[in-house]
């Protein structure tokens, strides 16, 4: 059986202090904006970047890999859950979307 | 109302100080998340999708006006100016920063509140009939027993690491407003042959394997309650499965071992415990009960209420939001937190302050949180009702829909919850807005819709007349419907109708169910649930699926 092709990933987590969703950038920062994230096309690199993220426990919590695809301004979410994490809740203009209006 | 003793206060303060140190050590890097997570959960602090969430216990749903004002102040200072009341009679703050949480807990301790045992595999906040101490149909106020259970279970050394969370609900009324059959232990006061006691139910729980509680004892004398409950939890502690968290609740133990075997083990343990107990809890219960003495009732004319009924807005509200009080000249007021389009269970800080002021002025300073995510003013003199209605209207809290189709229970779902598979709040908002626009609510009559954002069933969707479960089907939100559930003394689990509906199909689907009911009911007195029981699922399934097909054709 052939393995499914690797779907591109980003590394994401929540900020330790604020709990806000953050993404790992190519230069090892954590950005509150998914567009800044490093889009990872290779499985071995993804595993490596996740290990790096998991070792950043003094800054972020619960790092994991999520599917992403390239977009106009940078990586974009594939799954609706990850899309919500880039905005905030739908019942109040709170979270990230609050700063955009 | 019960107020904390110095002992309670010092325990809570010590816990806050301890947690303050733990947060500091987490922030300076000396504690890892693996070390810190169990500590924060023990203090009610979760990490959700967009932020931390602090869950605060409202024991048996009773709040003083002073406590409500403290919640408002916390919402303003450390959150975004609102709080979310839950089906477990708790309040959740959705936006705290980690470093602020110890200050929030101190502010709670100032008014005798805390977040202890709102998480983890412990005995959780004991929930109770929100009309306790006020209901006309009540045998006796169950809250002294609830408070005794709270004290007994808080920091109980043997029960800090149970196989899974453990939830106890209690009611003093034959009419069950506390969903006792969906709890690990349900306690229902009964009076048989003149003596008061409790019917003890065990093994209820919804979630992935929904089950209704089974009767373990028909009538347990009240004096035996604490050793008996200790025997149940002790048996569960040994028997409950620790190998699989999906099979760890007591309902699975009851299912796997059978009620007869559970009963044998509990009775055996109870016999041993009872003789060792010595009745110290009895004197203590009497002291607690004294603190739940009824308020000094006000006497006076009720004419203002009768006169106000001429106003259609007041009348519509009075018909749905008032319930019979133990005193004929009083009423229980349900304040709906479900204005159509609002988030079920959310209250702004200003609304909390208004509720506190109204409670101080007209309800002896007392408030309740209900398992249906509303607030109750338990003791309002009928002569004051029109003033209460005017004050609620001014605060945007006079929605006249308690128990109606727009009084929807919804968990936070994927707008907040990290475990969610779909959103629930927008579905609730859209259904409520749709039915408000149709202006059919009062004609439809009592109808409970409950919406959970995943299989954990925090909104109790299995016992909603119409239950909705949000799922992730191949990367899109999909909603499964159950019908015929019942959360009361005639508890029933709803039955699934069939395939789920997409987010943009769920509101019309619910509307088709309701229209089918209106067309088929024998008259306005036949409620949705009664009609469903008479007709069975077939006509509703036809409305759901056949009409949908003909629409598409
Ligand atoms: C961080 C948010 C939450 C998390 C992580 C969470 C998690 C869970 C889980 C895992 C269960 C299933 C337990 C089991 O069956 O063993 C559960 C059950 C439950 N939760 Fe939540 N929950 C959350 C929020 C809420 C809220 C906001 C409410 C009230 C609206 C609530 C009320 C309940 C109730 C009533 C049950 C019992 C359902 C049953 O009978 O099995 N939860 N929760
Ligand atoms: S039912 Fe699921 S989505 Fe809703 S609050 Fe509970 S765990 Fe979260």
Image (cartoon, coloured by chain):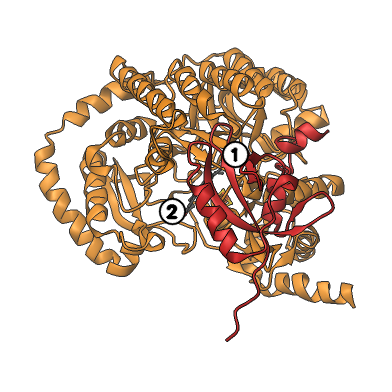
Give the colour in which the image draws chain B: orange
Residue B181 is marked as: 2
Chain coloured red: A
Mark 1 Cα within 10 Å, few/some/many (few <14, many 20+)?
Answer: many
Along the line of sight, the residue nearer the viewer: B74 or B458:
B74
User: Which numbered disc, 2 or 1, marks the residue closer to the eye?
Assistant: 1
Residue drawn at (36%, 34%) of the image: B146
Under tag 1, what secondary structure? loop
Along the line of sight, the residue nearer the viewer: B502 or B267:
B502
Tell me: B170 left or right of A77.
left
Along the line of sight, the residue nearer the viewer: A54 or A67:
A54
Residue at the bottom extreme? A1
Which quadrant holds the N terminus of chain B?
top left
Q: Is residue B405 visible?
A: no
The verdict on label 1 being within 8 Å of ligand 1 is yes
Q: Chain of mark 2?
A: B
Residue drawn at (28%, 49%) of the image: B219
Where is residue B540? Give x, y as percent.
Answer: 71, 69
């Amino acid at each position: 059986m052939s393995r499914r092709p690797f779907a591109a990933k980003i590394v994401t987590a929540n900020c330790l202090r604020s709990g806000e969703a953050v993404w790992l950038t190519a230069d090892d920062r954590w950005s509150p904006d998914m567009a800044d994230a490093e889009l990872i096309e290779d499985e071995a690199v993804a595993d490596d970047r996740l290990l790096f993220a998991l070792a950043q426990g003094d800054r972020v919590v619960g790092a994991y890999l999520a599917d992403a695809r390239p977009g106009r301004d940078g990586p974009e979410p594939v799954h609706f859950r990850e899309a919500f994490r880039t905005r905030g809740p739908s019942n109040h203009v709170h979270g990230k979307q609050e700063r955009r209006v | 109302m019960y107020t904390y003793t110095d002992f309670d206060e010092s325990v809570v303060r010590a816990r806050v100080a301890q947690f303050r140190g733990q947060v500091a050590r987490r922030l300076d890097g000396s504690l890892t998340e693996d070390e810190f997570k169990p500590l924060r959960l023990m203090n009610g602090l979760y990490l959700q999708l967009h932020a931390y969430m602090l869950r605060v216990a409202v024991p048996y749903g009773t709040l003083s006006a002073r406590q409500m004002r403290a919640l408002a102040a916390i919402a303003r200072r450390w959150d975004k100016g609102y709080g979310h009341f839950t089906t477990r009679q708790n309040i959740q703050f959705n936006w705290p920063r980690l470093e602020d949480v110890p200050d929030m807990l101190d502010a709670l301790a100032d008014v005798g509140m805390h977040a202890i045992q709102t998480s983890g595999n412990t005995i959780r906040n004991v929930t109770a009939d929100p009309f306790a101490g006020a209901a006309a149909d009540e045998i006796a106020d169950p809250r002294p027993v609830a408070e005794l259970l709270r004290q007994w279970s808080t920091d109980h050394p043997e029960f800090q690491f149970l196989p899974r969370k453990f939830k106890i609900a209690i009611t003093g009324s034959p009419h069950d407003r506390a969903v006792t059959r969906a709890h690990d232990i349900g306690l229902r006061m009964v009076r048989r042959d003149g003596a008061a006691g409790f019917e003890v139910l065990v093994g209820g729980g919804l979630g992935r394997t929904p089950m209704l509680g089974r009767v373990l004892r028909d009538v347990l004398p009240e004096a035996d309650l604490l050793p008996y409950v200790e025997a149940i939890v002790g048996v569960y502690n040994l028997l409950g499965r620790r190998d699989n968290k999906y099979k760890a609740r007591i309902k699975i133990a009851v299912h796997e071992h059978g009620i007869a075997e559970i009963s044998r083990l509990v009775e055996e343990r109870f016999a041993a415990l009872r003789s060792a107990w010595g009745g110290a809890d009895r004197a203590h219960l009497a002291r607690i009960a004294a603190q739940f003495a009824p308020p000094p009732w006000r006497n006076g004319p009720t004419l203002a209420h009768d006169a106000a009924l001429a106003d259609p807005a007041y009348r519509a509200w009075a018909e749905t939001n008032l319930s019979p009080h133990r005193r004929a000249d009083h009423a229980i007021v349900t304040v709906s937190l479900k204005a159509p389009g609002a988030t079920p269970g959310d209250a702004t800080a200003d609304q909390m302050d208004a509720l506190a002021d109204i409670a101080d002025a007209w309800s002896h300073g007392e408030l309740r949180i209900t398992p249906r995510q509303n607030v109750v003013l338990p003791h309002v003199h009928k002569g004051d009702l029109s003033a209460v209605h005017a004050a609620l209207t001014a605060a945007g809290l006079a929605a006249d829909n308690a128990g109606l189709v727009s009084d929807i229970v919804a968990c936070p779902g994927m707008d907040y919850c990290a475990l969610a598979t779909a959103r629930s709040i927008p579905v609730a908002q859209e259904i409520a807005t749709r039915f408000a626009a149709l202006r059919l609510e009062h004609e439809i009559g009592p109808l409970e819709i409950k919406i959970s954002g995943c299989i954990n069933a925090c909104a109790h969707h299995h016992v909603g007349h119409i239950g909705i479960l949000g799922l992730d089907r191949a990367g899109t939100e999909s909603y499964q419907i159950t019908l015929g559930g019942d959360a009361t003394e005639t508890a029933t689990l709803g039955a699934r109708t069939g395939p789920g509906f997409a987010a943009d199909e769920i509101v019309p689907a619910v509307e088709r169910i309701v229209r089918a009911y209106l067309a088929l009911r024998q008259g306005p007195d036949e409620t949705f649930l009664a009609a469903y029981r008479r007709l069975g699922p077939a006509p509703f399934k036809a409305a759901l699926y056949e009409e949908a097909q003909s629409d598409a054709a």
